[in-house]
């Protein structure tokens, strides 16, 4: 049967767009259903501050009246200003295992981006590099950790058949308690700690005023530490505040750390409990069952995701990152966690990859891929 592409309207068709994802993973035990309320917030063009500098268009692919795929086309003008290019994006991609369906979806996104004056398409981003991004292309043996994407193995072949090629890989590393702690790391971080007078403290979650002061410190580190990185776009103040409110709901206050060197702000690290270990049982995606699973299965969460670890440029290359890794690992083990995922790391970020592999004995186990094509 012929494939038809249907243009969806926001907000009218958002719920249909989100719920369509369930049909692609109905029989996949490793898929972690997203919370519907969070997906709606992500796609809310009036409330999500991302859309103050971005636009999005949603599409369904249908055959014989049945949804067989979906995609979003996205513009992000802040990205193009920062990187001095003219890229458009795609995200929220799902498809049955049919190259014709994927081709039709990619062409729909390309056409919309072409109308917006873009000359390349890149993705997947959902809806930006500051959200979930990349296509899983290596290691499909375990569920995704919190705020990381997941997809069937055949998606990569579909996108490549549609004319997209790799532009960058993003790595995920597995850290295990018995391998991270060793005499070499202990001695090294202690030397660095003394040499640069490094102190580390948890973020203040109890005092509202201090909380937002600490949010400002982390925002400053985040936007400066990653500024030179491929694809990085600074978060606006409104975006960072929205992110802070969301993460506050799931963060462990003892695992959000701010570091100083000789009394000056130098870096931060944030590790989130892997709530996906509980949410994987919430097959409906509704909020109340999700909360119930989080409450009843909280003790069974064994893993954290190191979401952010960054240093201000003037403190990079001094080994202070080892102190942060040591501190987050020590505190995580004290809380009962036995594993951590550090993700994601650009394949061309040699210092970070080296530190994870050599200093922390981490194992690169998952790879996520960014694709691109001319329009």
Image (tube, grey):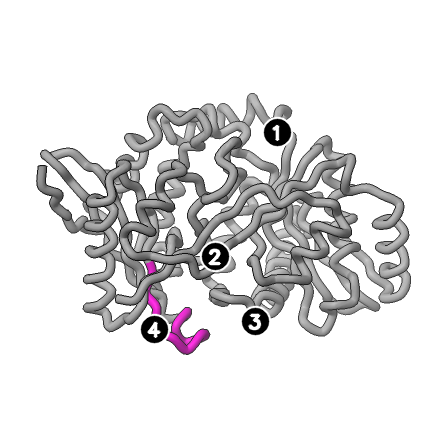
User: Was residue 82 drawn as part of the magenta stretch in this picture?
Assistant: yes
Image quadrant occupied by the C terminus: bottom left
> Disc 2 on helix, strand or loop?
loop
Relative to 295, residue 193 above or below: below
Q: Tell whether label 2 touches label 4 (CB within 8 Å).
A: no
Question: Mark 1 or mark 4, which has the lower sequence index?
Answer: 4
Label 4 vs label 2: CA separation?
18 Å
Q: Say which label, 4 or 3, has the lower sequence index.
A: 4
For the point 28% across and 70% down, the residue is 118
Residue carrying label 4: 86
Q: Residues within 10 Å of mark 2 (few under 14, many from 20)?
A: some
Q: Nearer the viewer, residue 232 or 243?
A: 232
First-in-chain label (1 vs 3): 3
Tell me if residue 124 comes above or below residue 329 in the rendering: below
Q: CA distance from mark 1 to mark 3?
A: 34 Å
Circle 1: element type: loop
| Label 1 sits on residue | 301
Labels 3, 2: front one: 3
């Amino acid at each position: 049967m012929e494939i038809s592409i249907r243009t969806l309207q926001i907000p009218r068709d958002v719920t249909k767009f989100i719920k369509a994802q369930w049909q692609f993973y109905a029989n996949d035990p490793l898929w972690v259903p997203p919370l519907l309320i969070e997906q709606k917030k992500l796609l809310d063009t009036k409330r999500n501050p991302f859309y103050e500098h971005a636009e999005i268009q949603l599409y369904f692919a249908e055959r014989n009246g049945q949804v067989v795929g979906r995609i979003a086309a996205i513009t992000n003008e802040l990205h193009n200003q920062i990187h001095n290019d003219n890229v458009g994006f795609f995200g929220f991609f799902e498809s049955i295992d049919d190259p014709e369906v994927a081709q039709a979806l990619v062409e729909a996104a390309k056409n919309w981006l072409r109308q917006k004056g873009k000359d390349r398409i890149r993705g997947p981003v959902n809806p930006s590099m500051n959200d979930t991004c990349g296509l899983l292309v290596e290691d499909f043996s375990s569920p995704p950790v919190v705020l990381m994407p997941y997809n069937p193995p055949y998606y990569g072949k579909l996108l490549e058949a549609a004319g997209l090629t790799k532009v960058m890989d993003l790595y995920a590393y597995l850290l295990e308690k018995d391998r991270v702690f060793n005499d070499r790391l202990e001695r090294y971080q202690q030397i660095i700690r003394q040499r640069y007078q490094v102190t580390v403290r948890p973020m203040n979650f109890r005092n509202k005023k201090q909380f937002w002061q600490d949010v400002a410190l982390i925002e400053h580190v985040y936007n400066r530490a990653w500024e030179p990185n491929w694809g990085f776009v600074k978060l606006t103040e409104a975006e960072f505040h929205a992110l802070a409110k969301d993460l506050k709901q799931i963060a462990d206050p003892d695992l959000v750390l701010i570091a100083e060197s000789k009394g000056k702000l130098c870096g931060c690290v944030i590790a989130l409990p892997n709530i996906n270990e509980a949410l994987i049982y919430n097959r409906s995606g509704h909020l109340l069952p999700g909360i119930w699973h989080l409450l009843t299965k909280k003790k069974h969460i064994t893993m954290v995701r190191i979401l952010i670890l960054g240093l201000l440029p003037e403190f990079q290359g001094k080994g202070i990152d080892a102190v942060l890794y040591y501190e987050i690992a020590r505190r995580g083990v004290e809380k009962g966690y036995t594993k951590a995922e550090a993700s994601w790391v650009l394949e061309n970020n040699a210092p970070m990859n080296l530190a994870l592999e050599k200093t922390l004995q981490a194992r690169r186990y998952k790879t996520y891929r960014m694709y691109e094509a001319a329009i």
